[in-house]
Amino acid sequence: DAGITQSPRHKVTETGTPVTLRCHQTENHRYMYWYRQDPGHGLRLIHYSYGVKDTDKGEVSDGYSVSRSKTEDFLLTLESATSSQTSVYFCAISEPQVGQETQYFGPGTRLLVL
Amino acid sequence: GDSVTQMEGPVTLSEEAFLTINCTYTATGYPSLFWYVQYPGEGLQLLLKATKADDKGSNKGFEATYRKETTSFHLEKGSVQVSDSAVYFCALSPQLDSNYQLIWGAGTKLIIKP
C-alpha cells in the first residue's frame, strides 16, 4: 500500500472557524491532489500540486486554499468553514507518466461543519 | 470536454451472479482507463486499468476491456461475492496534457446479497 496518511481522520467544527487538513506521503511522489466526496457528486477535485510550491485549482476550489512547502506534505485549509463544506475529503498522490497515471488514495477525513 | 458516464446504482445482485457495470467515455485520442473500488469507510484503490485499445485489465476476478470502437470500458465479474459489495468508479486520464488529472464517473454502488 502507498504510504499516505491523512489527519485528522474525523473532525467536527463550527461555521466560521478555520480548518486545516493534512496529507502526508512517504512515497516521494511529485503530484498530490485533494478531492471531496459527496453523495450524488462522486469525486470532485479541489486543488492539486505538481511540486513543492506549485499548486493549481480544481473544479471546486472556492473557499479552499492549499500549501505545499515540502514534497511529503500537502495541506488543505478552509479559511472560514461553512456547512456546505461538510464532506469526506480524500488526498491522493501520483508519479505520473503517460500510461502510468494511477493515483493512490489516503483513507479520508470526515469533516462535519455545524 | 472529456467525460465518463457510469450506470446508475445501486446494483443489487445475489451471490455468485454475473456482474456487469457499464462505463462509457468521451475523449479525444487514446486515454488511459481505470476502475477504482471503494469499500465502506475506506479510500479508493485501483482495481484495474488499461492504457491502449483492446487491452484487457484484470484483477481479483474482475475484467474490463478497452473498446475504442464503442468508447466503453465495462467492468465484469463471473461470480460475485458478498465481499465485492462496494462503490466502483470508472475514470480516464486524457491523452493530451491535462496535468495528469483523472476524469471520474459518478460511481456505482454494488450490493451483493447472500
Image (spheres, rainbow, N blue to C red):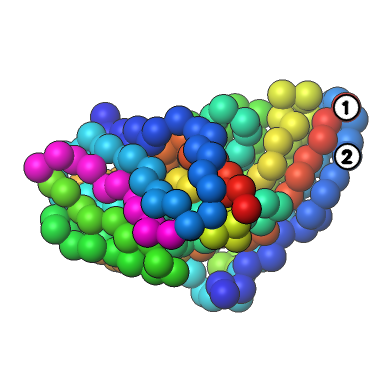
Report the residue marked by disc 1: A114
* For residue A103, above or below residue A26: above
Tell me the subunit letter for badge 1. A
User: Would residue A40 be seen by someone viewing this image from the given angle?
Assistant: yes
Inspect the magenta stretch and tell me whether residue B74 lies in it: yes
User: Would residue A55 be seen by someone viewing this image from the given angle?
Assistant: no
Q: Of the numbered discs in the image, which one, if any, rests on residue A94?
A: none
* Location of residue A95 (image quadrant): bottom left
Quarter of the picture containing the C terminus of chain A is top right
User: Residue B69 versus residue B27: which sits nearer the camera?
Assistant: B69
Range covered by the magenta-colored residues:
B69-79
Q: Is residue A96 left or right of residue A113?
A: left
Q: Amino acid at mark 1?
A: Leu
Quarter of the picture containing the N terminus of chain A is bottom right
Report the residue marked by disc 2: A12
Inspect the magenta stretch and tell me whether residue B75 lies in it: yes
* For residue B93, above or below residue A78: below
Q: Residue at x 32, y 60 (%)?
A: B63
Marks 2,1: beta carbons within 8 A: yes
Q: Residue B30 in the image: x percent, y percent?
A: 16, 50
Q: Residue B6 in the image: x percent, y percent?
A: 38, 35
Q: Residue A38 in the image: x percent, y percent?
A: 63, 33
For label 1, the SS is loop
> What kind of secondary structure does the magenta stretch mostly adopt?
loop
Q: Residue at x 78, y 24 (%)?
A: A83
Q: Residue at x 61, y 39 (%)?
A: A36
* Location of residue A26 (image quadrant): bottom right
Q: Is residue B31 left or right of residue B69?
A: right
Q: Residue at x 56, y 68 (%)?
A: A71
* For residue A45, above or below residue B86: above
